Image: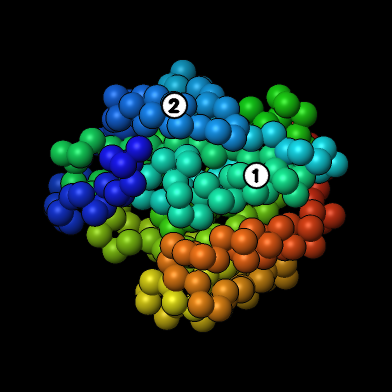
Amino acid sequence: MQMLRLPAFLLLAVMIVETVQAVSPDSGREKLIATELANDLDLGEILWLETAAGNEFPAIFYEAFLGHHDTGIILLHGLGAHPDWPDVIAPLRRALPMEGWPTLSIQLPILSLETPVGFYGETLRTARARIHAAVRYLSKLGFRNYVLLGYGFGAATGVHYLTHVKKHRIDAFIGVSMMARKFLSPGIDLNARLREITIPLLDIYGSRDNPVIVNTAADRRLALKSADNTVYHQLELPDADHYYAGQSTVLVEAVSNWLRSVETMFQIPVGEEPE
């Protein structure tokens, strides 16, 4: 699993190009990741979900131990990572089911090692289709409510989804260390998008997080206030860095407490498919 530990953006030189080309996920890399994860996976099961266009991608589902929740959590990993990423994603994926929330951690589109990292901005449309598929899967299992939880670029992906899908079925959003890297092409204006979100939202980051995330916390707070989001909470975890090293238990507790506080506000779904 060592080869999966280093994100793609650390393996590639940051290349900003003037002409944005169409890019597709590297299905070979995704299959390799899924195979290696399956060999080492001790909690949960590897699934292959299918988008409406018939494209398959891997995910990890971990059933809740306490069956009293009607809510499933969809996890979105960071840039160039995978559904059992050891920082943030794996701890939450494994711990939230112990609190009653099943987790479905999906593989976001991953590009070939030869593709400039800036082109990850082109993967957002494909990511939307995968989030749709994740919602459909949880719906078939009988869950009525859905929470998106994204880490780093995964959080920016979640914000993009919520503001580009006319009728989504997401009831709440959790952004862990939200950031949209400037070298992405096309870019994401995170604060502008946050102004459009009115569902319950938790913005959580560490006091020793990436300086960009810490220094823009006030801007994110103002963006959500301008959206009239009355169920917005921003939380800084003391002593936590961007990887939440040694702080996983604190992170899980903070997320669980917030979920319990907002779950009663979720609406009964009306059954439409997202557009």
Q: Nearer the viewer, residue 216 or 46?
A: 46
CB-based contact (under 8 Å), mark 1 and mark 2: no
Q: Residue 189: x and y, percent?
A: 40, 63
Q: Residues within 10 Å of mark 2 (few under 14, many from 20)?
A: few
Residue at the spot 41% in from the left edge and 36% down from the top edge? 126
Number of residues whose C-alpha sits closer than 10 Å to that of mark 1, classed few (under 14), some (14–19) or many (20 or more): many
Q: Residue at x 18, y 50 (%)?
A: 12
Circle 2 residue:
39
Where is residue 121? Give x, y as percent: 32, 49
Q: Amino acid at mark 1?
A: Ile
Residue under circle 1? Answer: 73
Locate residue 182 relative to residue 82 in the image: left or right.
Answer: left
Q: Is residue 204 left or right of residue 270?
A: left
Amino acid found under the numbered disc labelled 2: Asn
Identified at 31% across, 42% down, the residue is 2
> The C terminus lies in which quarter of the figure?
top right
Q: Is residue 7 visible?
A: yes
Residue 241 % position (x, y): 44, 70
| x, y percent for residue 254 | 67, 65
Q: Is residue 132 visible?
A: no
Count the marks: how many? 2
Q: At 85% from the left edge and 41% from the top edge, which residue is drawn? A: 68
User: Is 3 left or right of 164, judged from the image as shown?
Assistant: left
Q: Is residue 6 above or below residue 59?
A: below
Q: Image quarter for residue 243?
A: bottom left
- Which numbered disc flags the more N-terminal residue, 1 or 2? 2
- Secondary element under disc 2, as helix, strand or loop, is helix
Q: Tell me the CA gap for discs 1 and 2.
A: 24 Å
* Above-or-below relation of 215 to 73: below
Relative vertical location of residue 159 with respect to residue 116 in this rendering, above or below: below
